[in-house]
Amino acid sequence: MIRMMQRLAVAAALLGSVGLGCAGLAHAAPFDVEHATQAYLNTLQGAARARSDAYFDGGIWVEYIGGLVTVLACWVMVRLRLLAGLRTRMERSGWRPWIVTLACAALFLLVSSLIMFPWSIWADYVREKNYGLMNQTFGEWLGDQGIALALTMVFGSLMLLAIMAVIRRAPRRWWLLGTGVVTGAMALMLLLFPVFVAPMFNTYRELPAGPVRDRIVAMAQARGVPSAHIYLVDASRQSDRISANVSGIGPTVRISLNDNLLKRGTVPQVAAVMGHEMGHYVLRHLWWTLGALALLTAVMLWMASRVMPALVVWGGRRWALRDIADPAAIPVLIGVYAALSLLASPLTNAIVRIQESEADVFGLDVAREPDGFASIAMELSQYRKIDPPAWEEALFYDHPSGATRVRMAMQWKKDHVANAVEVVPPPMAAKGPGKD
């Protein structure tokens, strides 16, 4: 459940500059998009490229096995009859039905998280540490996990309470009303996250005055993006990944960039990052994503409404379940939804990837930094397979691959830069990976 809630938010970062001081210019020949693209791709070779491929390929298995672990945790919960036992005891003690449901929801979230915790330690801490993507100690990481669990217990319990109430009052059309509940919860999280949730994990302070802030403000004002507050995040406490975003909705919209980006990027590079992120805001990607996820949620809940009754009938006596509105059936609901989410992951990846590609184009237009764009695409490829087959990118990538992004940047350069000259990219420095 924690993973499902954490995936509500989408962030992307692209950075770069034309004519970076660390890059040399090749001879003035007709600009060849493919040759220029390959020059960048060749900067990631040998062991570094093999490591990147291995991390990404393993990550696909981690994602799918994690979903299966969620389903397994739900199965263990119904087999142990923990919620059924709690429900029966509370009903005998005279507790009101909504309190019984809330208690069952909280117990489910707590116990299922504990069941999944060993997997989470390996997938989210040990594996990340082994690949050099984790700066935290185990204790620091555990503290963040505790905060995430507490938030999940509060918001997740309330959302499950609302969904079970809908199932009880509208047993035939609960999937439609349930879609409204889930969509409303996502919108609320997007509203609250930048102001109330994100500061629980990191410190946010105003970006100091200077060339970086001036460039960001100028770009934001030109594109109608709120820029009264621009925040710097101490993301280096977790990792060396570079990132930035325009988050929130309505009154909570804010621009943020992390300290890794500020330390490692030039002014033109930071401008290119923010150009991409502002694209998400100007193109209203947040609302398009929310609408697309609402539609997908409706389909999955409709399918769940057809599967759940059969499962409850099949395992009712063994699992001590009464009907689909029984609070003890919460693991059945979440298990079915998690399985359907796994099947739908190529579609959700495509939804995000299309919008990331649109933001890439916007970022190139507003920052006009194609070589910097290409160089940061290479940085990001230190943890994402850079040049996958088309079918693999379509199924498993929620962002365009590095090769796709570099090629887009070089095509943009050919189309928009007069007398474009190919840049000879320098060897990639041994830095921590980026995150877009």
Image (tube, rainbow, N blue to C red):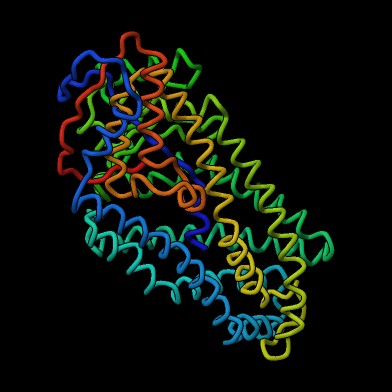
On screen, residue 423 above or below 10: above
Residue 107 on image: x %, y %: 55, 74
Residue 154 on image: x %, y %: 53, 60
On screen, residue 139 above or below 210: below
Could you tell me which residue is drawn at 42 percent across and 18 percent down? 366
Could you tell me which residue is drawn at 31 percent across and 20 percent down? 213
Which of the 4 image quadrants contains residue 329?
bottom right
- Quadrant of the image for the C terminus? top left
Front residue of 337/230: it is 337
Q: Is residue 207 left or right of residue 148?
A: left
**Labels in figure, total:** 0
Q: Is residue 385 left or right of residue 171?
A: left
Q: Residue furthest top?
A: 418
Which of the 4 image quadrants contains residue 203?
top left
Front residue of 148/434: it is 434
Could you tell me which residue is drawn at 34 percent across and 49 percent down? 385
Could you tell me which residue is drawn at 76 percent across and 59 percent down? 175
